[in-house]
Amino acid sequence: MFFFIGGVQPKTVKLDENPRTCPECGHSELYIKRTDSYLSLFFIPLFPVKKGIPFMVCENCGSVFTQDGTSMDGFSGYRAQKCPHCGRSVGTDFVYCPYCGKSL
């Protein structure tokens, strides 16, 4: 008996290495990215099937923008908050930081 484990999976690709300034937080960590669909075999992406729409995401605050700079409010779930004590990213639904244990 032979089993074929494969399918289509998303993969986010960074399109440039030149950071831009984020209009939300002011840090220079805004990159243009795109989520492409790849055909995978045994969970290894082999080749792209469909290219996604480019967008900009800040790696500091998690804000997501279109390429012309307008905010994509539908992706607010992508955002993460930072712990004021240890500075690590935590989910927006957390009350206590899972890393240092202090109240958010």
Image (spheres, grey):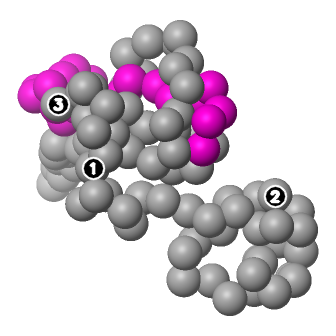
CB atoms at circles 1 and 2 under 8 Å apart?
no
Viewer-proximal residue among 30 and 100: 30
Q: Is residue 90 above or below residue 56?
A: below
Q: Is residue 9 above or below residue 100?
A: above
Q: At x 16% / y 31%, what residue is drawn?
A: 52
Q: Count all numbered tags in the image, as a single digit.
A: 3
Residue position for label 1: 72
Q: Is residue 29 magenta?
A: yes
For residue 87, the mark is: 2
Q: Of the residues shown, which amino acid type is indicated by label 2?
A: Gly
1 lies left or right of 17: left
- Range of magenta residues: 25-52
Q: Earlier in the sequence, mark 1 or mark 3?
A: 3
Q: Earlier in the sequence, mark 1 or mark 2?
A: 1
Q: Of the residues shown, which amino acid type is indicated by label 1?
A: Met
Q: Is residue 40 magenta?
A: yes
Task: Give me the C-alpha separation between circle 1 and circle 3.
Answer: 13 Å
Under tag 2, what secondary structure? loop
Q: Of the residues shown, which amino acid type is indicated by label 3?
A: Ile
